[in-house]
Image (tube, helix red, strand yellow):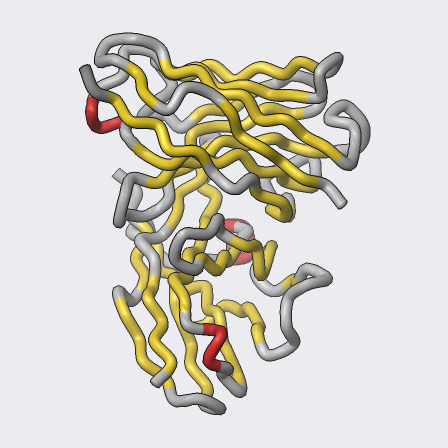
Amino acid sequence: QTVVTQEPSLTVSPGGTVTLTCASSTGAVTSGYYPNWFQQKPGQAPRALIYSTSNKHSWTPARFSGSLLGGKAALTLSGVQPEDEAEYYCLLYYGGAQLVFGGGTKLTVL
Amino acid sequence: QVQLQESGPGLVKPSQTLSLTCTVSGGSISSGSYYWSWIRQPAGKGLEWIGRIYTSGSTNYNPSLKSRVTISVDTSKNQFSLKLSSVTAADTAVYYCARVRGSGWDGAWDYWGQGTLVTVSS
């Protein structure tokens, strides 16, 4: 069974920088996994942030960026704001018509 | 602006079929290159992809749910639907519908519905 692993929780200070990662049980994550990133706040639907590794939506704040880092997909927040406190999920594509979400990272801004 | 809205029964009995509809507004479901997806989230847990349907009607399903899932589209009503058969308590979750822009697996997930809670209980 394919497992996508994210850090369960991270803490960052306001104005700081933090990187969330997304790893695959099958090996290194490449651009062919088409990583997507989503933000979810309590009681709300997920909101799309990044698609195909590093592409931003029109509504994605400039402080969010996506990349590949050390065999994982990564989401970096630079200049973190209090409103960035949320759960973040990655989504990877696996051949054979399968999409798998990571378990989520709870980001605390403190 | 495109909006998606899930609807359907909030309570389903075990062994029965869960049926949900997602109504799309602000754009035609049959125009452009889009996949229309279903995702679910049990309380306090992560997201699980259920499946998707393309504008043309072709479908893909999560292998773990494939035997029980059917996704269909009704272009006349600008809606797409989810049916999940033989439900158990493990199917209790918030169900979301979402749009994915593009014709392949590299599409951009953009708009999501607000979600609807479905509880499986007798």
Q: Quadrant of the C terminus of chain A?
A: bottom left
Q: Residue at x 32, y 62 (%)?
A: A6
Residue A53 sits above or below residue A43 on the image: below
Q: Is residue A23 visible?
A: yes
Toward which corner of the image does residue A49 lie, by quadrant? bottom right
**How far from the left and from the top, in percent, is residue B93?**
32, 34
Residue B56 sits above or below residue B48 on the image: above
**How far from the left and from the top, in percent, is residue A55?**
65, 62
Total numbered circles: 0
Residue sitting at the far top: B16
**How far from the left and from the top, in percent, is residue A96?**
45, 31
Q: Nearer the viewer, residue A26 or B61?
A: B61
Q: Residue at x 40, y 28 (%)?
A: B62
Q: Residue at x 44, y 57 (%)?
A: A40
Q: Quadrant of the N terminus of chain A?
A: top left
Q: Nearer the viewer, residue B26 or A94?
A: B26
Left or right of A61 on screen, residue B31:
right
Toward which corner of the image does residue A7 lie, by quadrant? bottom left
Left or right of B109 on screen, residue B92:
left
Q: Nearer the viewer, residue A68 or B108?
A: B108
Q: Residue at x 54, y 21 (%)?
A: B21
Residue B117 sits above or below residue A68 on the image: above
Toward which corner of the image does residue B55 lie, by quadrant? top right
Q: Is residue A70 visible?
A: no
